[in-house]
Image: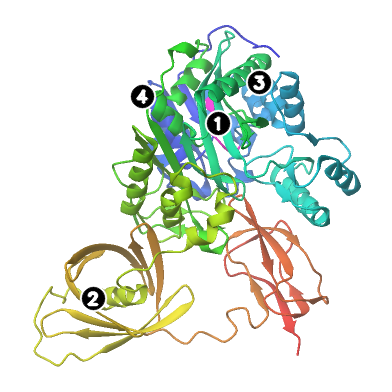
Amino acid sequence: MTATRTTATPFRTVLVANRGEIALRVMRTARRMGYGTVAVHSSADTTSAHVRFADRAVLIGGPLPAESYLDIPAIIDAAKASGADAVHPGYGFLAENAAFANACREAGLVFIGPSPESIEAMGDKARAKAFMQAAGVPVVPGYQGDDQSEARFAAEAQTIGFPVMIKAVAGGGGRGMRLVADAASLPALLASAQSEAKNAFADATVLIEKAVVSPRHIEIQVFGDCHGNALHLGERDCSVQRRHQKLVEEAPSPAVSDALRARMGEVSVKAVQALGYEGAGTLEFLLDRDGGFYFMEMNTRLQVEHPVTEAITGLDLVEWQLRVAAGEALPLAQHELRFAGHAIEVRLCAEDPAHDFMPQSGRFGAWAMPEMLRVETAMADGAEVPPFYDSMVAKLIAHGPTRDAARLMLAEGLARATALGVATNQGFLKRVLEHEAFAAGEATTAFVGAHGEALASRPSAILPDAALAALILFVADSAPRHRARARHVGPPLPVPMLVEIGGTKSEVAIHRDRDGGYRIDAGDQRTTVIVEAISAAGLRLRLGALALDVPFHRVGADLFIQRGADQIHVRDLTRAATKPAGSDGSDGRLVAAMNGRIVAVHAAIGEDVAAGQPLVTLEAMKMEHVHAAPVAGRLVEIAVTPGEQVTTGRLMAAIEKTA
């Protein structure tokens, strides 16, 4: 393939076909360069930060992606109506959709990205792999043929040798991807991967390839222009992942030497030139323990993790995208690039690491990010996390002279951040950065699987969670009557309180001492605390010589407490009614654990099911979640159908328990 144009294509107003922090990131650079900006948004994003930031905004449909951010005609119409003459797809949604790039071309709009031909060539994993192999790029052994039968995949897997990896040819982001350890597990995992690929990309086609055991995930940032120039901007290490989706990215990689970087960069640039590629792109590789690297896929867009490359190069990659799209040559040549220091990025996601990273939705009652870090986000106090989109709510980036300096700065920034009201992976990320294997630069794609349980566990504290929660509730209820260190003349009568944290109920007794302090009895532990100050957003307390600031947010009986990088969700049960029997699922009722779309129902009315047997698969925030039977018995009701949207707590099935 060759570049399709060599003339300038000036534009003045950029429509960003994306949402949230992605749209904000692109708009900030566009505005700095003097371009007008247009936002598009769904009905769920009417008050989102990217809508308020843009010069103009256009409502393009309902809350579901297919009704809005994936609706190509609606986005083209929005560009025409708003006067935009260029479209930036961001990263996600339609960013790697050849039909969208072609629709922009046909509408006379400048598409700020590669040509439809390049996107199409790299969008099919099997075709991309064949192209790269012909261009001299090392690839992983595998099968990507038209025969999609279970028998063919079983035969190919035996030839390749287990373990193998199944991947959706039309997808990315971990969807349609399954690791198969042995022949016995292949049929179920193949069916699951094909189903997820069909639902996510409208294409059930998958490929199979040799699984490189405990590899590094290394990607090379590349750029090309319409004048035939191409270069690379070094590598990023994206090995820390969950569900095959990245959580931590850094540049440079602690596993890549100067010589290896030069080799990987050279083959990547050759591939870009062979493709006639224009704009930003990324070639992703698996790096084995012996320094061998194998092409996985090419992302024909800017990556979420591009800020770490910007940090070590001092460049603005969105600016480069805009200049290349306008027909300019790349601003620098390969030999002019300079790399300085080390950068690490973490993805702050609305999810619960202790429960298989289950996505969360809701509203942030308190949100404050540290000024010491670069933070990319659309969140603020009161901002809502809808259940319809990706779970990432912010990116936090640290840049330092050394890897350790960046790592420690980022860990401290996570400890200072406040994100209350929706569960996040904030504490998990801090523990990743502090883990000895990550600190030593030894983390591979197996890191989270090997250490996930420890990373999800919060360390113990001097003041137990239940005691702190009860104290905050007690003092908050007495404010503004509370006065720090106020002396009391009456007897220190205990006040009984009942709180629930993580499904565990705790009885706590609060004593107000004569000198104004508090004695807290939680189980067999007694703690004496001085409350020095309290406001609607936080409390300052003293335990002996130790002074602590504790941010919190309260909504009715729900209390959210920030303890360092961790959030505690507390239910105040002191005056709550007794919870109905069976609401924990023991009555045979299966309810949705989150908002989402029903992907599949795995049993029929009248069937006998076992406890723990999969009954319903629900998709939320780009992930599939299997809901299993809470008890053994006969399935007497199925209240949902595939394709249906459900809300948290919605009844999906009912089981008549076996006597």
Up-down relation of residue 304 to residue 134 (above or below): below
Which residue in the protein does label 1 denote? 89
Q: Is residue 111 visible?
A: no
Q: Nearer the viewer, mark 4 or mark 3?
A: 4
Q: Tell me the residue at 79%/53% (across/down).
A: 182
Pick whichever of labels 3 and 2 is earlier in the sequence: 3
> Which is more N-terminal, label 1 or label 3?
1
Residue density around tag 4, few if under 14, some if 14–19, many if 20 or more, within 10 Å: few
**Earlier-in-chain disc, 4 versus 1:** 4
Q: Is residue 452 visible?
A: yes
| Amino acid type at mark 3 | Glu
Front residue of 634 and 183: 183
- Marks 4/1 in contact by CB < 8 Å: the verdict is no
Residue 520's image quarter?
A: bottom left
Q: Position of residue 658 (x, y in %)?
A: 76, 86
Q: Name the residue carrying label 4.
A: 32
Secondary structure state at the residue bearing disc 4: helix
Q: Amino acid at mark 4?
A: Arg
> Can you say whether 479 is above or below 334 in the image?
below
Between disc 1 and disc 2, whose residue precedes? 1
Q: Which residue is mark 3?
A: 106
Q: Earlier in the sequence, mark 4 or mark 3?
A: 4
